[in-house]
Amino acid sequence: MELLISDTTWDIARTLNLIAFYLGSKFHTIKNRIFNIRYIDTSASEQPRIDKPFEILGYMLSIRLAIQVASLAKPYLPKVPSVEAPIVAIDGREINLLEKNEKEENDDIDALNDEYTCIPQNDIADPQRKCILCLETRKATSAMLCGHLYCWYCLENWLREKNECPLCRQHTTLKDVIPVEWLLYHRLDPIYSPIIWLSTKASLSKLNVGISPACYLSDSTDIWIDGDGELRSKTTTCSKKITDIKELKEWNFDGSSTNQAPGHDSDIYLRPAAFFRDPFRGGDNILVIAECYNSDGTPNKTNYRHYAKKAMDLVKDEDPWFGIEQEYTLFGADGAPYGWPKGGYPAPQGPYYCGVGAGKVFARDLVEAHYRACLYAGINISGINAEVMPSQWEFQVGPCAGIDMGDHLTLARFLLARIAEDWGISISLHPKPFTSGEWNGAGCHTNYSTSKTRAPGVGLQAIEEMIKKLESKHAEHIEAYGDDNELRLTGKHETGNIADFSSGVANRGCSIRIPRHVAHQGYGYFEDRRPASNIDPYRVTGLIVNTTLIN
């Protein structure tokens, strides 16, 4: 329309002449008409002068000219109130539904701080909008068929090597990738931009506080420990971005189906305790660590976090730090360790620990995906390595202060199980998957320090005092250090005997190990090697604090 209006008077005259020519005139140009120069017509006199195609062109030019003239004449026509754009008011300001307010189009307005200005999402810095491949804010966001989002260039490089999603392993190819930003700004924007602009302005109005922002939904997944020490989860929808744990609602579930409550009084309440970014759904979606409470308000029998939090609060001035080494074993759909020979055993232990290469390590891609998912979520994961037994791996979480240790490890376990689910692999936290043969078990070695043990000059003495306290409560700790731990703590395969308490420097065959560098420098941390791989991290960290600091 702007192009039509910009034509000159000469263009209009030329258009009129062409219309006349196509409809029967013999003057093709205005110059020919002025000087009476005609085209020679050698056709029979009875043949119709007007050819059908030229006639159609004449009518089309007539319609174009009519639109052009109407557009030029519009500013000079009297305005009729009934056809003017309706005017509404938001927060006392008049808003034209068809045209933006001139004030709002002023370049001097700070778009980031103006509550009525809508700007593209990518113009706003957001640490949660990260690509899991490069761990930076997504650029040229693109979606796979499974729904996971990545940078276009990261995804392009990945798919040139593997035709599968980096997270869920769903098969896909580069041609199936959807460039989300291109789709949004080049396909949807011309159609829906005015609608989204208006509805967003209305939802942000102080007079419409009950209306949620247009087109905004996010997910919140609650994660908790059930009656058997396993993890459960359920997801709900949030109408706004969650920035504080207090914004999350208290929820409930059927405790009789999770071995946490009897059938006649089965409701168990979920109270949000901590939340992290969701690496599966991305965006503003979150994963929530929740505590379980009975219908009478008391902590559920599995809620060791409640008691650990109390202990951590009592000793917060001591600044306890933890680091846990989580070992686990991979099993395939057939129930055998993943990658092991069918109906047999692999070569003896030796080449597998921190191994590299086919036949020495299995499912490294799963382990790497878990590592990246933990980093994206905000878990303080500090490393990974293949373990002594084939198909056994370890990841380390920490150092984490106080109650954070349990939260970070619990979520890391959830992410591991969730990713392995997409591979068709199950994760075993059993401390001794094989009782026959020379195979190592799986532990959860717990590293521990406080402000005193980390103090130069007095740290080593504080460590030795804590070890004496742990020795006096050895039986109590063993009871809390995991099920079936007696199968693992045999005094073999880098473990101490379950019946005896022992400690030493750089000795992996004892209960408590003081690292060599800690003994040399005189301060630092110590390692409790007794916890099994299936411990409740809240129960163990809370008990260690109680024994060493509260007594």
Image (tube, rainbow, N blue to C red):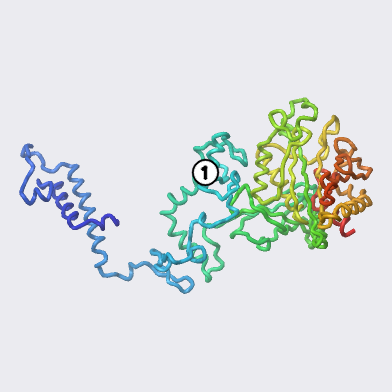
Residue 482 seen from this side: no
**Measured along the vertical axis of the image, is residue 153 above or below residue 219?**
above
Pointer 1 local density, CA inside 10 Å: few below 14, some 14–19, many at least 20: many
Q: Is residue 6 left or right of residue 388?
A: left
- When asked about the image quadrant of residue 356, the answer is top right
Quadrant the C terminus occupies = bottom right
Residue at mark 1: 152
Q: Position of residue 366 (x, y in %)?
A: 67, 38
- When asked about the image quadrant of residue 330, the answer is top right
Q: Nearer the viewer, residue 363 or 319?
A: 319
Q: Is residue 70 left or right of residue 524?
A: left
**Measured along the vertical axis of the image, is residue 498 above or below residue 101?**
above
Residue 504 seen from this side: yes
Who's the residue at 72% across and 49% down the image?
A: 232
Who's the residue at 89% across and 53% down the image?
A: 461
Q: Position of residue 170 (x, y in %)?
A: 59, 38
Q: Nearer the viewer, residue 373 or 224?
A: 373
Q: Nearer the viewer, residue 528 or 82?
A: 528
Quadrant the N terminus occupies = bottom left
Q: Is residue 419 left or right of residue 387?
A: left
Q: Position of residue 158 (x, y in %)?
A: 56, 38
Q: Position of residue 501 (x, y in %)?
A: 93, 45
**Measured along the vertical axis of the image, is residue 184 above or below residue 428?**
below
Q: Is residue 117 left or right of residue 525?
A: left
Who's the residue at 52% across and 45% down the image?
A: 142
Indicate the amino acid at tag 1: Trp
The residue sitting at the bottom extreme is 92
Q: Nearer the viewer, residue 395 or 509?
A: 509
Counting the numbered discs, the total is 1
